[in-house]
Image (spheres, grey):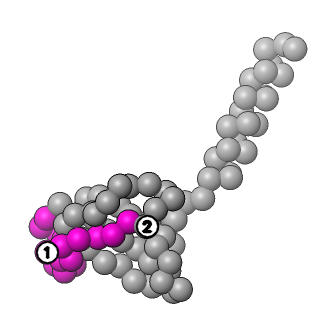
């Protein structure tokens, strides 16, 4: 293989990886909750529980976890701010 073929192959693989990644940051959530702490071990295989629920206004001033849920009540994302 020559250099041009290798570069095209690498670019193609990176492009396919970027296309396959889903970005949930721009999706609308049915419900958003804010917590000051998370209980338990953080793992993709376990349910995470928020502790110390705070209001959206309080979340603007404090470090917090943002839990976003879909319309079925399924947890979509947890972010720390």
Q: Which residue is mark 1?
A: 58
Q: Is residue 72 visible?
A: yes
Rendered residue at 18%/73% (across/down) = 52
Residue 56 horizontal/vertical position (percent): 22, 78
Drawn side of residue 65 relative to residue 48, left or right: left
Mark 2 surroundings: few (<14), some (14-19) or many (≥20) residues within 10 A:
few
Residue behind mark 2 = 47
Q: Is residue 28 visible?
A: no
**For the residues carrying marks 1 and 2, which lies nearer the camera in this image?**
2
The magenta region covers 48-62
Residue 39 picture location, percent across and down: 28, 63
Q: Mark number for residue 26?
A: none
Task: Estimate the x, y position of residue 34 in percent, counting from the top left.
Answer: 26, 73
**Foreground pick, 17 / 35:** 35
Is 20 located above or below residue 3 in the figure?
below
| Residue placed most toward the observer, 20 or 74 | 74
Quadrant including the C terminus: bottom left
Magenta run includes residue 51 = yes
Q: Residue at x 39, y 83 (%)?
A: 31
Q: Is residue 74 left or right of residue 38?
A: right
Q: Residue 33 sits in which quadrant?
A: bottom left
| Quadrant including the N terminus | top right
Q: Secondary structure at mark 2?
A: loop
Q: Is residue 16 above or below residue 55?
A: above
1 or 2: tag closer to the N-terminus: 2
């Amino acid at each position: 293989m020559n250099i041009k073929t290798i570069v095209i192959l690498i670019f193609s693989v990176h492009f396919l990886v970027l296309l396959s990644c889903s970005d949930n940051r721009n999706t609308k959530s049915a419900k958003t909750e804010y917590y000051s702490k998370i209980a338990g071990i953080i793992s993709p295989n376990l349910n995470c529980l928020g502790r110390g629920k705070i209001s959206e206004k309080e979340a603007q001033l404090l470090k917090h976890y943002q839990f976003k849920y879909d319309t079925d009540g399924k947890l979509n994302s947890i972010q720390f701010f």
